[in-house]
Amino acid sequence: MVKLDVGVHVDGYVADAAITVDLSGHRELVEASRSALEAALELAGPGMSTATIGAAIEKTIVGYGYRPVSNLTGHGLSRYVAHDEPVVPNKAIDKGIILKEGDVIAIEPFATNGSGRISEAPVNEIYGLSASKPVRLPQARKLMKEISERYKTLPFARRWLTGERAEYSLMQLLRAGVLHRYPVLWEVEGALVSQAEHTAIITPDGCEVITRKTG
């Protein structure tokens, strides 16, 4: 089972999408997250609570005999910000956020045959800029400038960095609080997890999915 989670941007305006490819005979687990995504998109619109969307996601996944991953959520998107408000839960909650026209949201249900929770693995490949701060080393200052100009606050991969002592400079920026990590995630029991995701703009009469294949 392979998950492909892709983000793109045009002039800082971000879209996020994900699919899961079944390579191990777990077709229904993949279908559970896909169906939950479609159920959520059917509900998304102005005046709709994210709590109601989360309940629909949970009901759909449980209907397939699996659990939603409760400590992962969908999210809002804004210019140069890949994870913003509002949070879109993957389970029923007591109180949500009311969506309004113009909101841009990424809905991403996760279904699992495990406990329904994930934790952070001790591996980091993706980073993001938190804030520009004074740093002592010239190489670290140069790297901070490069990151700020090239990626702004969007995530970037460590392997994209070039230049003298890039790895050491990266660690210096992390220690200074200039960067934050996006750690690899895994299910706490080592179970399988499927994911499906689309980005949608809330319109007057529902939502427009901007990451769905057309034509």
Image: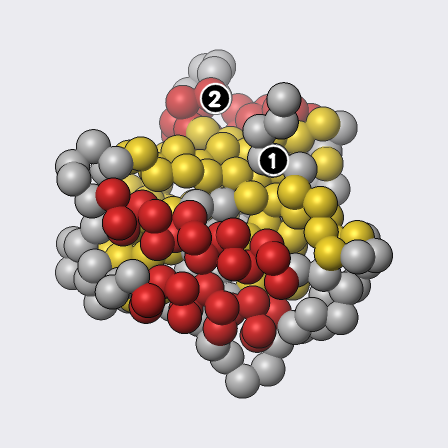
Q: Which residue is mark 2?
A: 161
Q: Residue at x 35, y 54 (%)?
A: 32
Question: Is disc 1 surrounded by few (<14), some (14 to 19) or many (20+) residues within 10 Å?
Answer: some
Q: Residue at x 66, y 30 (%)?
A: 9
Where residue 159 appears, x then y in whole percent?
40, 22
Badge 1 marks a residue whose secondary structure is loop
Q: Is residue 191 left or right of residue 116?
A: left
The image's mark for residue 36 is none
Badge 2 marks a residue whose secondary structure is loop
Q: Residue at x 59, y 50 (%)?
A: 106
The picture quadrant where one finds residue 148 is: top right
The residue nearer to you, when weighing 51 against 72, is 51
Real-space Cα distance between discs 1 and 2? 28 Å
Q: Amino acid at mark 2?
A: Leu
Q: Which residue is mark 1?
A: 211
Question: Is disc 2 surrounded by few (<14), some (14 to 19) or many (20+) residues within 10 Å?
Answer: some
